[in-house]
Image: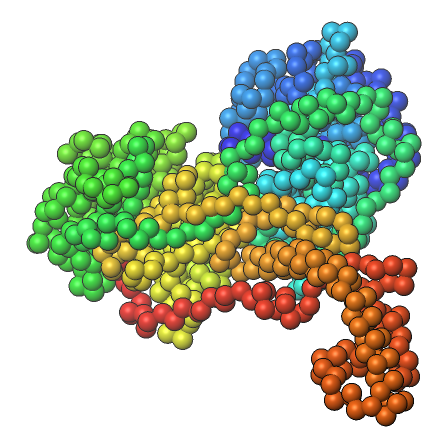
């Protein structure tokens, strides 16, 4: 998944450029012949640097004559900047044709992944952090930045190398075995630019487009948490199914258009018509509209031409002292807000056939090949998780509640999926444990004499192995690396330990025993550890009396740290109030932190520690204790007890990592959570929660049910998901009640329709007999009246009621037309079927859903200083 995401970030990042591009057709015509003639000729390749005056120069970056061997090949090459001084890129001129190239991306970095003339991009683009500077696709014309704006390169902080990545989609154009020299020419200047350009990429990573679905919306939204930036250009990108892509700034509920465009036009950078500035706490939002018509299988986000993409690129500038060169948004932080998105976001942009022809060139892929390729696309793991209904329930026969444990502080799963418990034995963290300087006060008692690390069978809680006696004073965090080593923290010792599963002595110790501190060699009550399975880097959350994340090399050498104390007015990105729990998200190369007293989750990039996103919900309450990620896209968390006067219950949460949306909550049924301190989950969604006050471990598991539901609207069958990307519908999720109600209504309508049809036929057969009987009765009555008979008292009372209904408005006439017309569903052209809508009463009776009774938590204990 990490590789997929990197490729997506690479693929998704920029695939064209064109500022001041008001008329796609006119500008496209102007450059079409030029791009075609250059695409297969290495013009300028012998003169990579061209002087343009005293301070300006051009750098020609081209593929060195390559011939891809198979479709969807990604090839990379690098070019050094060749100057040591700081320079600024102010113009990009592409040399490519979409007959041969699907898209090009240009990165800036300091160490390319290879020193070869060119290489397969599967090896990576750069070894260090890379920034995307430019993107091209669909025969887009050149891009020139506004005056005074440039991408900073070289010098002490800028990139020393450019890496060009070219995606060769369909290689049928290479049947003649010609050499390709596609690339881009950069215009650079040494003149200092007061404003620094950057790229902001918004992309959906989890969109699924069902076959035949007319409208599918992919929504993206992130809160902006940096210095002001000024937007001056935008670019959209999808593949064949995209209809329109729109981007907005949302401030105080007001939607301001950044830009909207058809992705089937040249995918260039278009000028933002009315300049838009973005400030701290604004929301950036985007929507891609797709149609799955003509497809026979689901379409997913991916790197091939038969997959889809949903990208909205923003080119911005910032003041040089605050400049950030590259930012991304891959989540939907507020799905509810899209109910108010302007209607224009779902209004397709008309693309004339001649424009489509020119945009696509002469190269069209066959529909049959498209279908065959689609059928071969494997379903990815995260989509298998998010496509199904499930609910987390307690395993009531789990014997783990009967274990004799001390305060349970940490949980983890080892490589064999056994449950590992870290507990405090007969030691307790209370108000007497530390002095005001965080020095442990009960050293005289000695370390815990019981085994503090227990390995349990996850099915029956049978003890498989135990260790850790006489090592620890106050255990806290636990994690297990890919090799099965235990990584633990002790808040009394202020240390981090690495233990082999069978070793009695630690393999590595970080920190100084019993000495709190905040430098490179000391911790202050460290809370948790995470180890990168790829690089072996060690991340420590430190802690109760420090507010930082510290990174070490695999052998324990200090690398860097980030984080600071929370401001008095509000918690800002990168600030912590007890970073309490860590979880690695390898799929996205992120580290997520349970920022306990700020009641939120913060996620950072593994490489740089740069803030990526915040996940915060009102239902978290004021405290969020622990977080755990499961490969495939699910995030699990547990919160703390509510404060007096607050109603949020203590419970567990299941979230969609990509969107941050809560898709389920869970809590035990046999007892109640007292202070859930840690949570760990497996890929099959088995969840374990350790409670430090209840001194126990709960086990939960998922109950799943695959469903396909559809509803009728105006006689057209559409998927119940309507226009969302992916809906995870859960039994007790607030978002799931409406679809369930709709299903119940439709089921009732179908039942009602079948029953009413039978009743209608029977009624229509009986009515003539009743009418004849009524006529006979009427004649008999008239005769009796005329001849003075007294037979009226012999009439059955029910016959009288029937007669009353058969009378017309005139009182004495028999009007069968009015009789039938008074019944719903009657047509004078014939007897129509009764309406299948059913009555309101029937729907209401069957439509009721059990409302969850709000959990009233017992009064919480005093705000815990120990956990």
Name the residue nearer the viewer: 363 or 829. 829
Name the residue nearer the viewer: 262 or 565. 262
Q: Residue furthest top?
A: 177
In the rendering, at what x and y percent does residue 695 appear?
22, 56
Residue 651 visible, this orientation: yes
- Residue at 87% in and 28% down: 358
Q: Colour scheme of this structure image?
A: rainbow
Residue 270 visible, this orientation: no
In the rendering, at what x and y percent does residue 711 appear?
68, 52
In the displayed structure image, the side of residue 432 where residue 98 appears, left or right: right
- Residue at 59% in and 65% down: 847
Give the total of numbered labels.
0
In the rendering, at what x and y percent does residue 640 appear?
36, 61
In the displayed structure image, the side of residue 204 where residue 388 appears, left or right: left
Q: Is residue 496 above or below residue 736?
A: above
In the displayed structure image, the side of residue 183 where residue 610 appears, left or right: left
The image quadrant where one finds the C terminus is bottom left
In the displayed structure image, the side of residue 299 where residue 551 appears, left or right: left
Name the residue nearer the viewer: 580 or 649. 649
């Amino acid at each position: 998944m990490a590789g997929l995401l990197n490729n997506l970030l690479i693929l998704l990042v920029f695939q064209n450029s064109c500022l001041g591009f008001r008329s796609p057709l006119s500008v496209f015509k102007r450059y079409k012949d030029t791009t075609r003639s250059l695409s297969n000729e290495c013009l300028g390749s012998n003169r990579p640097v061209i002087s343009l005056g005293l301070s300006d120069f051009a750098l020609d970056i081209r593929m060195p004559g390559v011939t891809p061997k198979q479709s969807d090949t990604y090839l990379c090459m690098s070019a050094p900047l060749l100057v040591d001084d700081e320079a600024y890129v102010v113009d990009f001129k592409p040399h490519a044709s979409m007959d041969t190239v699907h898209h090009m991306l240009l990165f800036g970095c300091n160490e390319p992944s290879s020193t070869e003339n060119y290489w397969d991009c599967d090896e990576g683009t750069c070894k260090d952090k890379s920034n995307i500077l430019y993107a091209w696709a669909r025969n887009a014309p050149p891009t020139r930045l506004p005056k005074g704006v440039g991408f900073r390169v070289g010098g002490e902080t800028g990139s020393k190398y450019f890496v060009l990545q070219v995606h060769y989609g369909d290689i049928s154009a290479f049947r003649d075995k010609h050499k390709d020299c596609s690339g881009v020419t950069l215009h650079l200047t040494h003149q200092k630019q007061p404003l620094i350009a950057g790229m902001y990429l918004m992309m959906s990573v989890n969109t699924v487009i069902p076959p035949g679905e007319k409208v599918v919306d992919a929504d993206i939204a992130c809160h902006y948490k940096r210095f002001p930036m000024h937007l001056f250009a935008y670019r959209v990108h999808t593949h064949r199914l995209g209809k329109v892509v729109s981007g907005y700034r949302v401030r105080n509920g007001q939607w301001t258009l950044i830009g909207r465009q058809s992705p089937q036009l040249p995918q260039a950078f278009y000028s933002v018509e009315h300049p838009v500035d973005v400030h701290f706490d604004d929301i950036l939002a985007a929507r891609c509209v797709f149609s799955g018509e003509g497809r026979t299988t689901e379409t997913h986000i991916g790197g091939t031409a038969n997959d889809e993409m949903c990208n909205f690129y923003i080119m911005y500038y910032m003041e040089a002292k605050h400049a950030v060169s590259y930012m991304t948004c891959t989540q939907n932080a507020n799905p509810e807000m899209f109910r108010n998105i302007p209607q224009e976001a779902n209004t397709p942009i008309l693309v004339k056939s001649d424009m489509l022809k020119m945009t696509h060139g002469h190269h069209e892929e066959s529909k049959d090949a498209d279908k065959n390729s689609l059928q071969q696309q494997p379903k990815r793991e995260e989509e298998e998780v998010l496509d199904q209904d499930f609910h987390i329930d307690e395993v009531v026969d789990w014997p783990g509640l009967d274990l004799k444990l001390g305060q349970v502080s940490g949980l983890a799963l080892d490589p064999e999926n056994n449950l590992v418990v870290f507990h405090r034995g007969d030691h307790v963290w209370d108000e007497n444990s530390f002095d005001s300087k965080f020095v442990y006060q009960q050293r005289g008692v000695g370390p815990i004499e019981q085994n503090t690390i227990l390995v349990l069978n996850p099915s029956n809680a049978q003890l498989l192995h135990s260790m850790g006696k006489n090592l620890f004073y106050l255990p806290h965090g636990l994690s297990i690396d890919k090799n099965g080593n235990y990584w633990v923290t002790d808040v009394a010792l202020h240390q981090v330990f690495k233990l082999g599963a069978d070793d009695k002595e630690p393999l590595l110790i970080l920190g100084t025993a019993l000495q709190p501190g905040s430098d490179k060699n000391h911790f202050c009550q460290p809370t948790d550890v995470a180890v990168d399975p790829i690089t072996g880097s060690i991340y420590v959350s430190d802690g109760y009396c420090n507010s930082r994340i510290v990174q070490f090399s695999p052998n324990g050498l200090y690398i860097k740290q980030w984080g600071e104390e929370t401001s008095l007015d509000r918690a800002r990105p990168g600030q912590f109030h007890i970073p309490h729990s860590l979880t690695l998200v390898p799929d996205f190369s992120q580290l997520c932190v349970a920022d306990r007293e700020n009641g939120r989750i913060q996620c950072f990039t593994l490489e740089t520690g740069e803030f990526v996103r915040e996940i915060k919900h009102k239902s978290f309450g004021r405290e969020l204790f622990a977080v755990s990620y499961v490969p495939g896209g699910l995030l699990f968390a547990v919160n703390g007890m509510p404060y007096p006067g607050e109603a949020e219950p203590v419970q567990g949460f299941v979230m969609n990592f990509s969107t941050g949306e809560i898709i389920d909550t869970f809590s035990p049924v046999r007892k109640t959570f007292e202070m859930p301190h840690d949570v760990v989950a497996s890929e099959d969604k088995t969840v374990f929660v350790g409670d430090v006050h209840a001194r126990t471990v709960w086990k939960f598991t998922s109950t799943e049910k695959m469903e396909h539901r559809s509803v009728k609207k105006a006689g057209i069958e559409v998927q119940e998901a309507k226009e969302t990307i992916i809906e995870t519908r859960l039994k007790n999720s607030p978002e799931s009640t409406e679809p369930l109600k709709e299903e119940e209504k439709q089921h009732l309508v179908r039942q009602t329709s079948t029953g009413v049809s039978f009743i209608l036929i029977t009624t229509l057969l009986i009515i003539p007999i009743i009418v004849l009987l009524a006529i006979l009765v009427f004649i008999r009555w008239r005769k009796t009246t005329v001849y003075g008979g007294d037979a009226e008292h012999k009439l059955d009372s029910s016959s009288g009621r029937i007669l009353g209904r058969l009378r017309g408005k005139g009182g004495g006439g028999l009007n069968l037309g009015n009789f039938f017309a008074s019944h719903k569903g009657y047509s004078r052209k014939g007897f129509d079927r009764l309406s299948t809508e059913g009555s309101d009463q029937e729907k209401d009776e069957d439509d009721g859903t059990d409302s969850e009774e709000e959990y009233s938590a017992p009064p919480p204990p005093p705000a815990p200083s120990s956990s």
